[in-house]
Image: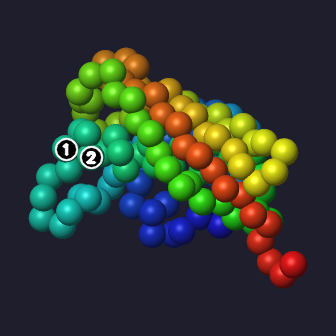
Amino acid sequence: MWSAGYVQAVDWRWVKGGVAETGPAVVWMRPRVPLVAGETTTPLQALMVCVDSASDVSSELDAASWGFQNPELTVHLLREPVGEWFCVDAETTLGPGSAGLATSAVYDRAGLVARTSQALLTLPRGPR
């Protein structure tokens, strides 16, 4: 249920979990195309492209039956990122209603570089 454009624009190397699995997951990833056509993507830009999908990486609901939005994303950088590959170690926690929270620890080749949190709004797909 992921958008083919984004999925194809990123290289994915799954360590734990996968797109079709629910639960915590770990993936090394990098953008395959420039963020802006004709410009080199910086490590910070590449990190931001990757961490925005932490809630998708660690989904707790079947994407065929549930949709969700990320109304906000907070990224706490510990230092300037290096390289183009980032490891997103993500976990999603759902509340009793439609709200949830996806968090992640993000690594680059030098170690831990950031922690993230994303608020989630979940809704069932299909007719009601």
Q: Position of residue 74 (x, y in %)?
A: 44, 39
In the rendering, which numbered label is found on residue 42?
A: 1
| Residue at point 65%, 34% (across, down) | 91
Q: Quadrant of the N terminus?
A: bottom right
| Residue at point 81%, 51% (across, down) | 97
| Residue at point 25%, 33% (across, down) | 83
Q: Foreground residue, 51 or 98?
A: 98
Question: Which amino acid type corresponds to the residue marked 2 in the rendered image?
Answer: Gln
How was the colour assigned to the protein in this rendering?
rainbow
Q: Is residue 49 visible?
A: yes
Q: Foreground residue, 51 or 73?
A: 73
| Residue at point 54%, 55% (across, down) | 71
The residue wearing badge 2 is 45
In the rendered image of this protein, does residue 67 appear above or below residue 96?
below
Q: Is residue 63 visible?
A: no
Is 106 placed left or right of 117 in the picture? Answer: left
Assess disc 1: are there few (<14), some (14-19) or many (≥20) residues with their C-alpha within 10 Å of its C-alpha.
Answer: some
